[in-house]
Amino acid sequence: MTAFTIRPATRADVPAITSIYEHAVLHGTATYELTPPDEAEMANRFEATIGQGYPYIVAEGSDGTVVGYAYANAFRTRPAYRWSVEDSIYLAPEAKGQGIGRALLTRLVEVATESGFRQMVAVIGGSDHAPSIKLHERAGFRMIGIFEKSGFKFGRWIDTVLMQLPLGEGGDSLPDEAAYPGTLYRR
């Protein structure tokens, strides 16, 4: 697969998103969930994310199949963090290594910046997760820390890698609260 399109996610994409995430939960350390959530739970999470004004996008193959998705969500729920988001990117196994993750992250950064967010944080499961770390480095993220042995999955301890990317003016100016009042979370 080489041809794909990045577009906003819709409720109709939730079954494919659920399937992609299930594989990530069962076979990877990108998430520290141990049991894959069902489609109803994924639909609730999707609605909560977009309902609060956070970007949620998918990569769609030329045949119309969703092969990856990405979204930004609250980095932390305290109001002082309202200008910072955490990114999440998941790909179907067959979509890896084709530039889809890079395209999703690039577009996610653009949409989050357009939405007025000022910082994006990547929380990566595993200091040995080289593809995700390289993906974020190539997008301009810088390493800000490692929580050593902070997760336990697949019978082993896993580090949590933190990376950060300023969006727009980042912390060089004050945010315009009036320009981006948009969501319940951000008010």
Image (spheres, rainbow, N blue to C red):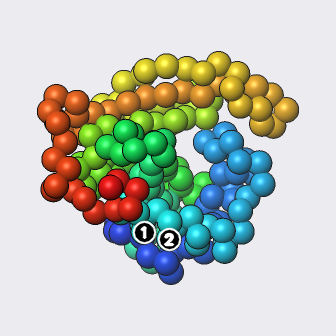
Within-10-Å neighbours for mark 2: few <14, some 14–19, many 20+? some
**Figure quadrant of residue 178:** bottom left
Q: Position of residue 86 (x, y in %)?
A: 44, 43
Between 139 and 38, which is closer to the camera in this rendering?
38
Can residue 107 be seen in the rendering of this structure?
no
| Location of residue 168 with respect to 7 vertically, above or below | above
Q: Secondary structure at mark 1?
A: helix
| Residue 127 picture quarter | top right
Q: Is residue 75 left or right of residue 182?
A: right
Q: Which residue is mark 2?
A: 47
Horizontally, residue 123 falls left or right of residue 80, namely right
* Residue closer to the observer: 17 or 162: 162
Task: Say which amino acid is labelled 2.
Answer: Glu
Instruction: Choose between 112 and 180: the one closer to the eye.
Output: 180
Disc 2 element: helix
Q: Is residue 50 visible?
A: yes
Q: Could you classify mark 1 by the number of other residues whose Cα lies within 10 Å: few (under 14), some (14-19), or many (20 or more)? A: few
How many numbered badges does the structure rendering display?
2
- Which residue is rendered at x = 22% and y = 34% of the image? 170
In front: 94, or 104? 104
The Cα atoms of the two marked residues, 2 and 1, are separated by: 6 Å
Amino acid under disc 1: Gly
Q: Position of residue 74 (x, y in %)?
A: 45, 48
Circles 2 and 1: CB atoms closer than 8 Å: yes
Give the percent coordinates (x, y) of residue 117. Answer: 28, 46
Q: What's the residue at 44%, 76% (across, down)? A: 10
Location of mark 1 (residue): 51
Q: Quadrant of the C terminus?
A: bottom left
Q: Is residue 105 left or right of residue 16?
A: left
Look at 36% across and 24% down and name the residue there: 142
The x and y percentages for residue 7 are 34, 68
